[in-house]
Amino acid sequence: MQQVEYLQQVGYPVQFSVDYPDRSLNRLSTAFRIIVVIPIAILLSTLSAGVLFFAPLLMILFGRKYPRWWFDWNLELQRFINRVGIYLSLMDDRYPATDDHQSVHLDYSYPEHLNRWLPLVKWFLAIPHYIVLFFLDYASFFVVIVAWFAILVTGRYPRGMFGFVEGVIRWNVRVTAYTLTLVTDRYPPFRLAP
């Protein structure tokens, strides 16, 4: 109950943040991150089909309710996807856990009431977000490359770069929550900030 109250106080019902690593990052694992991530990426690829978009879509459309167990599954899957994503983005040097939240904080509030017809057009309504995110994702890719060099030299992820990459991931998470996991009918904000 406190989680729902917190999410309502902060605004948008999908909250995402990553703890800034206030320590030296492991330079060796950073140097070979693209190789080290392969096993967990394989595991993630086998699970990513489990987003279960069509079943919740049909339940919302015909049953007017988001099944709680699908909601819980999708939330945990999105948390895992984002742990792998921040590991690949060099934002944490701890190998992504399958059950521990680590430095990633992702919360959705359970949707008590959803518009039954809106899930059919959310993907279309989100086209402006997809256009902006195309450019932001591209920029984020290059920021991560620059951060890779910075970590190898200094052992630190520059805070400004960290904030930018975190903001781009947050924006992606909110659009995914709106269009794919269908946990909110509120249109995602056009911003990187929380």
Image (cartoon, rainbow, N blue to C red):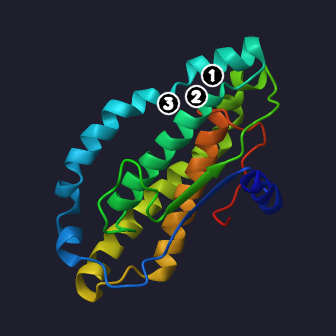
Residue in the image at 78% along x and 19% along y: 64
Q: Label 2, label 1: how many angstroms apart (C-alpha)? A: 7 Å
Numbered disc in front, either 2 or 1: 2
Q: Name the residue tied to disc 3.
A: 51
Q: Estimate the x, y position of residue 158 in percent, counting from the top left.
A: 42, 82
Q: Is residue 124 left or right of residue 145?
A: right
Q: Label 3, label 1: how many angstroms apart (C-alpha)? A: 10 Å
Residue closest to the eye, 40 or 90:
40
**Which corner quadrant of the image does residue 146 belong to?**
bottom left
Q: Name the residue tied to disc 2.
A: 70
Q: Are marks 2 and 1 in contact (CB under 8 Å)?
A: yes
Dot 3: within a 10 Å radius of its alpha carbon, few (fewer than 14), some, or many (20 or more) residues? Answer: some
Q: Estimate the x, y position of residue 32 in percent, counting from the top left.
A: 17, 64
Q: Is residue 145 above or below residue 7?
A: below
Q: Estimate the x, y position of residue 126 in percent, counting from the top left.
A: 67, 38
Q: Secondary structure at mark 1?
A: helix
All told, the count of numbered labels is 3
The amino acid beneath tag 1 is: Pro
Q: Name the residue tied to disc 1.
A: 56
Farthest residue, direction bottom: 154
The amino acid beneath tag 2 is: Trp
Q: Is residue 90 left or right of residue 170?
A: left
Residue in the image at 56% along x and 49% along y: 172
Q: Estimate the x, y position of residue 63 in percent, counting from the top left.
A: 75, 14
